[in-house]
Amino acid sequence: MEEIKACIFDLDGVIVDTAKYHFVAWRRLANELGFDFSHEDNEKLKGVSRVESLRLILEWGKVEKTEAEQKVLAARKNEWYTESIQSMPKEEILDGVIPFLKSVQAAGMKIALGSASKNARAILQQVDLMDYFDAIVDGNNVAHSKPHPEVFLNGAEALGVKPEECVVFEDAEKGVAAALRGHFFAVGLGEEEVLGEAHLVLPSLVDWDIKRIIATIK
Ligand code: B16
Ligand code: MG
């Protein structure tokens, strides 16, 4: 095993609990269009870009929209979403995250963000976490959505490390798939049934530090 030199964190569902805000905004849009979708369907939107999420939701509701109309709908959802995260408190940082980030820094490793969200910087600023990150790759810097590994490959490149030297932390099935396709180590945060392909699946980062993770995935 190569020496682990860096960690790359997904944002929504790994660092902060924003998935519920995405769900509320997408559901509001679907309801306005005359249909609904479930929590289970919502799982399929995790890690998926805004345009791709809308495409899936319209498919579920059997609603057809032109590209221009889709742009308007995606912008409307984003307006509701950004409005709701503007007042997001620091308490939305998921349990165990700050001590874990500190353990990565204390081990002398680099930290990058690898998120599909175009709102990533605003969210990190809102909850005052910007200073932990040596590099940020988000939805504004990638052409391909997860499960394509581009977001993580760009993160590793920005940190000057090889994928084999990085651990990726993800809450989405597509995110774990992206990490594995890119030859990263993958830690899934959530349920074993959804994230079972990862090298290690944990319910959360509570009581874990990077040294223990490395010792476990070796
Ligand atoms: P935005 P992640 C993803 O973030 C979310 O999981 C996904 O639900 C969302 O649609 C996507 O970001 C795009 O977000 O509309 O803010 O650009 O999990 O990759 O950090
Ligand atoms: Mg996520």
Image (cartoon, grey):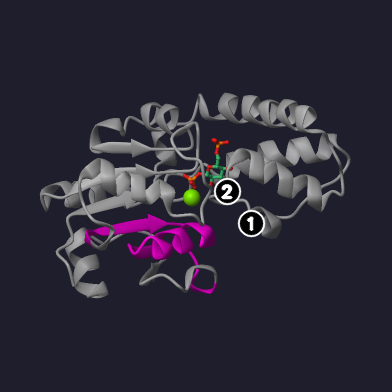
Residue 190 in sight: yes
Element at label 2: loop
Q: Look at label 2 and name its amino acid.
A: Val
Outermost residue, front side: 143
Q: Position of residue 193 (x, y in %)?
A: 54, 74
Q: Position of residue 6 (x, y in %)?
A: 22, 52
Residue 187 magenta-highlighted: yes
Q: Is residue 97 left or right of residue 36?
A: left
Label 1 to label 2: alpha-carbon separation = 8 Å
Most foreground residue, 68 or 32: 68
Q: Quadrant of the C terminus?
A: bottom left
Q: Is residue 6 left or right of residue 40?
A: left
Residue at 39%, 34% (x, y): give it.
90
Q: Disc 1 marks which residue?
A: 44
**Which x, y percent locates residue 178?**
45, 59
Foreground: 33 or 151?
Answer: 151
Residue assigned mark 2: 48
Quarter of the image with the N terminus is bottom left
Q: Is mark 2 within 8 Å of ligand 1?
A: yes
Part of the protein shown in magenta:
165-193
